[in-house]
Amino acid sequence: MQIAYSKTREQFPLSYKKIIKKTIANTIAITIPLLIIWGFLAFMLGSIGQEAIGWLRTVTFGIFGFLFVVILLTYLYQRWYFAVYFYDLTADFIQIRKGPITPREITLPYERIQDVYVDQDLLDRIFGLYDVHLSSATISSGMEAHIDGLEKQAAEGLRNIILQTVQQKISKNRNTNIPTNNNPIS
């Protein structure tokens, strides 16, 4: 798999721990309903009698086999997702492209960025990962405009570079938009 590199991704790389974190998160989300189904089936088959124990063993092996396949496919998908994850800071905007099957891309001009913040969810905290979020007035920025799976130094460095560039763009625009007063009122 060819990894989608950019100058920015090389300078502030994603952590490979992101693949494991996402695989575990998806596995937990799938395991809980499977355990509920297994518990229900165990209760139902257990109430039938001793002859249902064979069925319960078959169901148990089936669920664990299914779970193994799901974990393997999730891991492979997360590796692919990691490989195609692209982000770059250009002179005028931030470009983020992610998703291997249905790619989503957001291009955010620096002038529209209202907030840049770094956060963690519970699994991020366990793995030492951080997400850099970019807020603007658009709805899609809240869902799409974030770079997740960075280690602390990379996340803080990326945040600082973005904030500096936003500040420079805003200062430059303020200086060029000052009206000249050639016709003073007397």
Image (tube, rainbow, N blue to C red):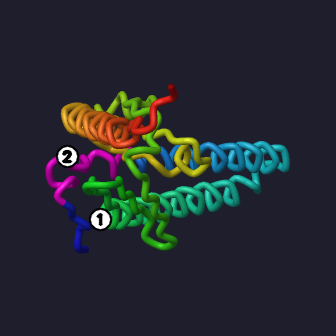
Looking at the rendered image, the quarter that the N terminus falls into is: bottom left
| Separation (CA) of disc 1 from disc 2 | 15 Å
Q: Check if residue 3 falls in the magenta segment.
A: no
Where is residue 45? Give x, y as percent: 78, 50
Q: Under tag 1, what secondary structure?
A: helix
What kind of residue is marked 2?
A: Phe
Which of the two discs, 1 and 2, labels the residue nearer the N terminus?
2
Quadrant of the image occupied by residue 92: bottom left
Residue 183 visible to the viewer = yes
Circles 1 and 2: CB distance less than 8 Å? no
129 or 165: which is nearer to us?
A: 165
Q: Mark number for residue 12?
A: 2
Q: Nearer the viewer, residue 147 or 40?
A: 147
Q: Secondary structure at mark 2?
A: loop
**Above-or-below relation of 9 to 127:** below
Q: Residue at x 33, y 47 (%)?
A: 18
Which labelled disc corresponds to residue 142? none
Up the image or down, 60 lies above or below 150; here it is below
Q: Residue furthest right?
A: 48
Q: Which residue is mark 1?
A: 83
- Residue drawn at the location 43% of the way across and 58% of the way down: 107
On screen, 61 above or below 171?
below
Q: Is residue 177 left or right of residue 35?
A: left
Magenta stretch encompasses residue 13: yes
x 70%, y 60%: residue:
55
Nearest the eye: 22 or 141: 141
The amino acid on which the numbered mark 1 sits, given as a three-letter code, is: Ala
Tell me the magenta residue range: 7-21
